[in-house]
Image (spheres, rainbow, N blue to C red):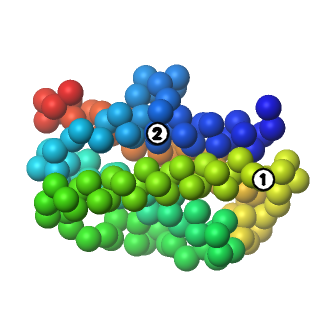
């Protein structure tokens, strides 16, 4: 299997359908979650909605690199997004999240091994493979937080 296919499968696994690493994925944790729970604060932790939107920010930003060749995101804005005020807002966000995750996986699986080794926009960011791997690791980190917050809110 090509390296790009392996990375695309790993993206789908963490976001859409996998259970191998964490025995769960974002879609499994969020798809049936009521919006009230998603925005409920537990201690001083980020909310589930904030963590999901944070990860989506990076998915959409990297997807934009593939679509338009531009990196237009910045860590400083990675927690700035519209407030979720209804189930409709939450469902709209989730649908966009799932679609962007699948779109990103489709872009990634089209890469050749040579393209995976090319600079990601700027040499200071490393190559495409490193950035995709980092996104997967970052996503698992926050997925673990979501699972723990759900347990703290007793909704698992």
Residue plotted at (19% across, 59% down): 88
Q: How many marks?
A: 2
Residue 6 marker = none
Residue plotted at (42% across, 34% down): 25
Q: From the viewer's perspective, tell me whether residue 110 is left or right of residue 92.
A: right
Residue plotted at (81% across, 38% down): 2
Question: Quick one: 2 or 70, which is closer to the camera?
Answer: 2
Viewport quadrant of the C terminus: top left
For label 1, the crowd category at 10 Å Cα-Cα, with few meaning under 14, some 14 to 19 and many 20 or more, is: some
| Figure check: 39 above or below 21 | below
x and y, in percent, of residue 12 in the image: 54, 40
Viewport quadrant of the N terminus: top right
Question: Quick one: 141 or 62, which is closer to the camera?
Answer: 62
| Figure check: 76 above or below 109 | below
Residue 22, quarter of picture: top left
Q: From the viewer's perspective, tell me whether residue 111 is left or right of residue 47.
A: right
Circles 2 and 1, Cβ within 8 Å, touching? The answer is no
Q: Is residue 93 visible?
A: yes
**How far is mark 2 from mark 1, CA to CA?**
20 Å
Residue 72, quarter of picture: bottom right
x and y, in percent, of residue 107 in the image: 67, 56
Q: From the viewer's perspective, tell me whether residue 24 is left or right of residue 126.
A: left
Comes first in the chain, label 2 or label 1: 2
x and y, in percent, of residue 92 in the image: 29, 59
Q: Is residue 44 visible?
A: no
Q: From the viewer's perspective, tell me whether residue 44 is left or right of residue 51.
A: left
Q: Give the secondary structure at mark 2.
A: helix
Disc 2 target residue: 16
Question: Quick one: 109 or 145, which is closer to the camera?
Answer: 109
x and y, in percent, of residue 23 in the image: 43, 23
Q: Give the secondary structure at mark 1.
A: loop
Residue 111 marker = 1
């Amino acid at each position: 299997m090509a390296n790009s296919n392996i990375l695309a499968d790993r993206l789908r696994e963490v976001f859409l359908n996998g259970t191998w690493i964490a025995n769960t994925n974002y879609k499994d944790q969020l798809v049936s979650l009521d919006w009230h729970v998603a925005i409920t604060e537990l201690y001083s932790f980020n909310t589930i909605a904030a963590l999901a939107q944070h990860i989506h920010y990076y998915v959409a930003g990297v997807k934009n690199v593939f679509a338009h060749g531009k990196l237009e995101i910045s860590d400083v804005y990675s927690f700035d997004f519209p407030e979720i005020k209804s189930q409709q807002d939450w469902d709209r966000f989730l649908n966009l999240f799932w679609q962007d995750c699948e779109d990103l996986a489709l872009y990634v699986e089209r890469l050749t091994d040579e393209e995976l080794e090319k600079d990601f926009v700027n040499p200071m960011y490393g190559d495409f493979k490193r950035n995709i791997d980092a996104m997967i690791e970052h996503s698992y980190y926050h997925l673990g937080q979501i699972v723990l917050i759900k347990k703290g809110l007793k909704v698992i």
